[in-house]
Amino acid sequence: MRRVLFSSVFFSLFLFIIFIQLNCGPKEEKEMTREEMIARGSYLVNLGGCNDCHSPKVFTEMGPEPDTTRLLSGHPSDAMLATIDTSMIQPGKWVLTSGTDFTA
């Protein structure tokens, strides 16, 4: 029992020392270049699925895809909004409509 306790304490101390060594070193904060900022923004937009709702779609052989000429432009101002069946807006019934280009 003593040996297990000693081993546990020793291992915990070892991990603590390693943690301190890794986090106490000098931190180099590098200024991001324009290209790095654009790449990071693109990564975040794709990770969050922003184009799913905020970009108009075009229909391709693979189904609807974001229109790359209008990324993140939102609902087109010249597009008509879909009519909403008010009978579907009741407790227990609801429907989401987005129009013909699938933008929110």
Image (spheres, helix red, strand yellow):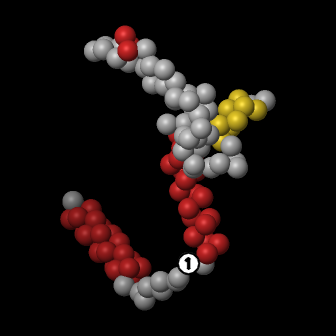
Structural crowding at the residue carrying mark 1, measured as other residues with C-alpha within 10 Å and reported as few (<14), some (14–19) or many (≥20): few
In front of the other: 80 or 54:
80
Q: Percent from the top left, x then y, of residue 40?
A: 57, 64
Residue furthest out toward the top: 87
Q: How many marks?
A: 1
In the picture, measured across the screen, residue 33 lies left or right of residue 17, that is: right
x 33%, y 69%: residue: 11
Secondary-structure class at tag 1: loop
In the picture, measured across the screen, residue 60 lies left or right of residue 50, that is: right
Q: Percent from the top left, x then y, of residue 79?
A: 59, 34
Residue furthest out toward the right: 61
In front of the other: 49 or 94:
94
x 28%, y 15%: residue: 91
x 30%, y 14%: residue: 90
Q: Is residue 74 above or below residue 88?
A: below
x 35%, y 72%: residue: 15
In front of the other: 38 or 2:
38
Q: Percent from the top left, x then y, of residue 61?
A: 78, 30
* Among the 4 quarters of the image, the one containing residue 16: bottom left
Residue furthest out toward the front: 78
In front of the other: 74 or 6:
74
Q: Looking at the rendering, in which quadrant would you find the N terminus? A: bottom left
Visible residue check, residue 73: yes
Q: Is residue 6 above or below residue 23?
A: above
Visible residue check, residue 52: no
For badge 1, the amino acid type reads Met
Where does label 1 land, which residue?
32
Q: Is residue 8 above or below residue 69?
A: below
Q: Is residue 33 above or below residue 37?
A: below
Residue furthest out toward the left: 2
Q: Percent from the top left, x then y, of residue 56?
A: 62, 40
